[in-house]
Amino acid sequence: MTYAVKEMFLTLQGEGVNAGARAVFVRFAGCNLWSGREQDRATAICRFCDTDFVGTNGLGGGKFADAAALAAAAEGFWGEGRDQRFVVLTGGEPMLQIDDALVDALHAADFRIAVETNGTLAAHPGIDWVCVSPKAGSDVVQQRGDELKLVWPQQGTDIDAVERWDFTHRLLQPLDSTDHAANVAACIDLVMQRPHWRLTLQTHKMLGLR
């Protein structure tokens, strides 16, 4: 299949359990919870996305004719050496495009594969690290994995129901909005009440990274 990628770049993972790790980010175009266009935001299921995933015109983006071509591009961004290779597949919603061929090609290139997904589509079983960031109002089918990253506060979220999902790590990430300070305080308050959650911050934004 042809893969539509908005952008691809080498950076440090800025969020979650793997924060600080060197990683190639592959941002796929397209999402099933929002078109990515501002005129559709008010009627979308996900209304707070802070990412441009429309088109294939970003740095390193494009349409890749097959999995081998995409994996080779990721290798090019990583550079020399095959030790500790780490790729983060994100979006948009990456599970709209991830398939057997891509997982096999990235593993053949010695990449450990992480995915950041909204959980409305089942994660590929070959992915090494599954991070689900659920959106209120969506039907989350991927209710188990390595990392549950809940943007908070999120009106309409049943926190008790979410806590019953099977994840190794549970993290709260403050909603990035004009009320950011209040959102950080809300996350801290919830962690203090429910200590099996942890606070995670978007450190890449603080450091001026992509």
Image (cartoon, rainbow, N blue to C red):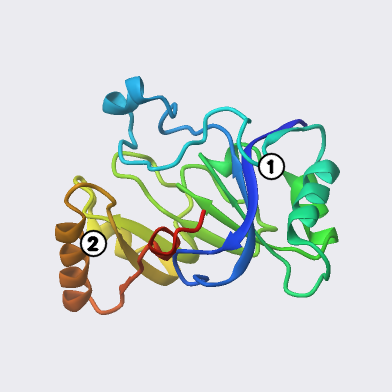
- Seen from the viewer's position, the closer of residues 179 and 157 is 179
Q: Is residue 169 left or right of residue 62?
A: left
180 shown above or below 98 = below
Q: Amino acid at mark 1?
A: Gly
Tell whether 10 sits left or right of 77: left
At horizontal 78% and vertical 48% (from top left) the residue drawn is 73
Identify residue for label 2.
160
Tell me the quarter of the image containing the N terminus: top right
Q: How many marks?
A: 2
Residue 138 lies, with reference to residue 108, above or below; the image says: above
Point out residue 87 in the picture as x, y percentages from the top left corner: 66, 59
Taking depth in this image into account, of 81 and 127 the one nearest to the observer is: 81
Judged from the image, the secondary structure of the residue bearing numbered disc 2 is helix
Task: Pick out the residue farthest to the top.
Answer: 39
Q: Which mark is residue 60?
A: 1
Q: CA distance from mark 1 to mark 2?
A: 40 Å
Query: Of the residues tagged 1 and 2, which is closer to the observer?
Result: 1
Nearest the eye: 3 or 53: 53
Tell me if residue 30 comes above or below residue 134 in the rendering: above
Question: Which residue is at the far front?
Answer: 208
